[in-house]
Image: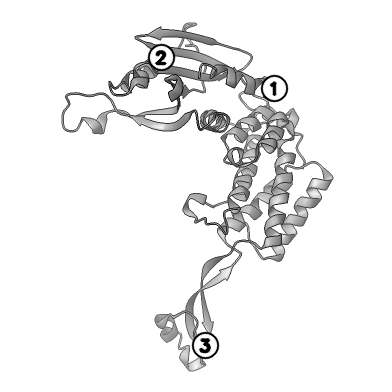
Amino acid sequence: MVLNHSSYTTINKIPITNIWLLILYASRLYKEIDKQQRIALEKNPEKIIDLVAKIYFKEVNKRFRSSLSKGYKPCKQKLSRIRGKIDTLVTARKLLLEKGKVQCLYNDLTSNIPKNQYIHAAAHVLLNQLTENELIYQCKKIINRFNEFKIEQSKNYNYKEDYFNRSNRQDILLISLANLIFSLSIPTELSGNYIFKKIDKTDAWLRNLFEKAIVGFCHVNFDSSKYSILSNKKFKWPCTQSTANIEKFMPDMITDLIIENTKKNYRLIVDTKCTSIFSKKSHSFKTSHLYQLYAYVRSQEQINDPLSLSASGMLLYPTINKSINEQVTIQEHKLIFCTIDLTQNANSIKKNLFSLFSNL
């Protein structure tokens, strides 16, 4: 069944195209593709699957022409001559020597490795997402080529555990493409006629996505020669006197994002949320969120760190048809409370993100 993606909205009423935009910002691919490709994807989130498919086909065909990466796969087999190591226990137990054979343990060089299986599996996911006949045809050709090479499918691959060198570094782009393809298929499972009942799970997924999207956007769109971008930095409580075991019981303080511009002596600590900016009981900012942001900016203060003494803090929320941008200075620290409306078009979302960080 071919899905008409543009007609779908998520449970949280965010257009599916904007969810795809967030997925793009959060992806490794967003960092690795060139500027022209990045702009094309940002400007056309409704066509993001087709555009990603074209990049995927191009890169996979490159690998087919230059040969797929290979790796060693552990094998065990009864052979008439020794290869690798002999499994003496199995050989003796099964009386293989009497039959002129030995049980051998060896490593076989093959293309059927987890990395290629992951890239292959992405083609099958992509096939269910495509609507253009020509792209569907190209996708089927890719799948047939993988089958010709006898490469299986697997969605269980952890690139962090793999090894990359100069010879297979180009696989990183393909793996990033495959990962994005898997991610783009997720919203369709959470959308439609609200058949997805696990709302808590969905909210947690959106919360994590929004945080990663903001971090990814800043990593790519801020000049690394001028800005320092840190994510998930842990702050220590400024304790001066404490009992021996206090660290076991103190809650962690981990910031979503820190942006610094040392030339302008400016540091911004950003904490993303995925709830309403206002308290349910009263039309005011949430007390717990305010306390949390205040704790972040105060706990990082150090006399030998000038930026820490005037650091700003920002609470950033996704909203639907609402825009808030307020700020106040408390004890030399500017605190900013703002939203990004995710019902806008992609271009407006990008412009508004730049506007929120304009003080940098």
> Alpha-carbon neighbours of circle 1 within 10 Å: few (<14), some, or many (≥20)?
some
Residue 346 spot, x, y in % from top left: 68, 25
Residue at 62% in and 35% down:
24
C-alpha span from label 2 to label 1 = 30 Å
Distance between mark 3 and mark 1 Cα atoms? 67 Å
The label shown at residue 345 is: 1
- Residue at image position (58%, 64%) is 70
Mark 2 neighbour class, 10 Å CA radius: few under 14, some 14 to 19, many 20 or more: some
Badges 2 and 3: C-beta atoms under 8 Å apart?
no
The x and y percentages for residue 159 are 52, 51
Q: Nearer the viewer, mark 3 or mark 1?
A: 1
Residue furthest to the top in view is 283
Q: Position of residue 187 (x, y in %)?
A: 64, 34
Amino acid of disc 1: Asn
Front-lying residue, 185 or 95: 185
Q: Earlier in the sequence, mark 2 or mark 3?
A: 3
Crowd band around label 3 with a 10 angstrom C-alpha radius: few (<14), some (14–19), many (20+):
few
Q: Secondary structure at mark 2?
A: helix
Task: Kindly identify which numbered label has been placed on residue 123.
Answer: none
Residue bearing the label numbered 2: 290
Residue 129 visible, this orientation: yes
| Circle 1: element type | loop
Of callouts 2 and 1, which one flags the residue occurring earlier in the amino acid sequence? 2
Q: Three-letter amino acid code at disc 3?
A: Arg
Which label was assigned to residue 81? 3
